[in-house]
Amino acid sequence: MWGMESLPFAEAAKRVKTAGYDGMEIAAGPGKRKEAVQTMRDNGLEVILMAFGGGADFAEHKQKFRDDLLDVASNKPLFINSHTGHDYFTFEQNAELIQVADEVAKQTGVKILHETHRGRFSYSAPAIQYYLLKLPNLRLTADYSHWVNVAESYLTDQAENVNRAIAVSDHVHCRVGQPEAPQVSDPRAPEWANALETHARWWDAIRTRLQRANAPALTVTCEFGPAPGYLPTLPYTNQPVASQWDINVFMKDFLKKRWSV
């Protein structure tokens, strides 16, 4: 629904279905999740739901995180994509939150993945290494565009760090980042060809790993964000430099062609 917040779920679902997507990933609030899931299923779409924490201190954040996960899981999405913890929480605090997610997943039978994201425990390729070492059950949503931005590089000097993440990444956000932003202006433009190919090779590696493991599917969310903010705009007019919708459809078609699916 990112960039389509003004649309009712039913209208968004029809637009997405017509464009050839298989599902939607939705950050719906507590009062909207049931409607979101039912509407997607009525339109023949799979649905992934997102979860977040919150609160003035860690104890409150942890309780709200548990409550949010339980509420999301009660709607039985395909799985939950979680924005877990904070970069300023200690390792022990973030590990407690990951443990909460493990407990909820076991209790409800709904898989929970943790997105690699700025501001979270997983904000950079080196920052996540200790978690991968100490928490062997940790599974990720791969949005490496954030890591490119944080590192101000395409991570060529961190291949081992990225490969450890690839080994436990089960879902992809196919946004293309660049060293000074988590999103290039337009991945179709020739000046971003190297950035697109760099990210695509990471996604290829995730797909290859899952194929070798005989996984039934790889889910990919086309997640280029809207203006203002993620999508650059022209000064004064705030006019987006490209169409968010068209870029995301391009990313879907790009990967389908690349992977012959």
Image (cartoon, rainbow, N blue to C red):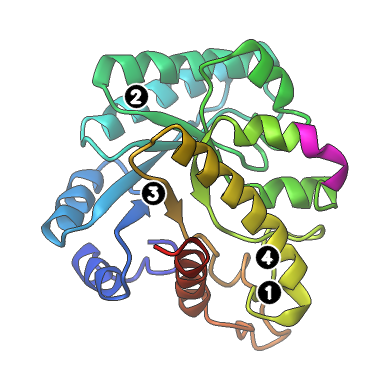
Residue 124 in sight in this render: no
Per the image, the residue denoted by label 1 is: 185
Residue 46 versus residue 224: which sits nearer the camera? 46
Disc 3 residue type (three-letter): Ala
Are dots 3 and 2 in contact, CB under 8 Å? no
Picture layout, residue 57 above or below residue 18: above
CA separation in Å, label 3 and label 1: 23 Å
Of the image marks 4 and 1, the number of the one nearer the N terminus: 1
Instruction: Give the structural element (helix, strand or loop) at label 2.
Output: helix
Residue 166 circle label: none
Please name whichever residue, 244 or 233, is drawn nearer the observer in this view of the structure. Answer: 244
Which residue is at 15% across, 62% downward?
Answer: 43
Label 4, on which residue?
196
Which amino acid, by three-letter code, is at mark 1?
Answer: Ser
Question: Residue 157 colored magenta?
Answer: yes
Q: Residues within 10 Å of mark 4 (few under 14, many from 20)?
A: many
- Dot 4 lies on which element? helix
- Which region of the structure is painted magenta? 156-160
Q: Is residue 59 shown left or right of residue 154?
A: left
Magenta run includes residue 46: no
- Examine the rendered structure and indicate whether residue 194 appears above or below residue 213: below
Specify which label sits upstream in the sequence, 3 or 2.
3
Q: Nearer the viewer, mark 4 or mark 1?
A: 4
The answer to whether residue 36 is visible is yes
Label 1 environment density (alpha carbons within 10 Å; few <14, some 14–19, many ≥20): many
The majority secondary structure of the magenta stretch comes to: helix
Q: Quadrant of residue 17?
A: bottom left
- Image quadrant holding the C terminus, namely bottom left
Can you give x and y, in whole percent of width and height, for residue 98 in the image? 51, 19
- Mark 2 neighbour density, 10 Å: few (under 14) some (14–19) many (20 or more): some
Local SS, label 3? loop
Amino acid, disc 4: Leu
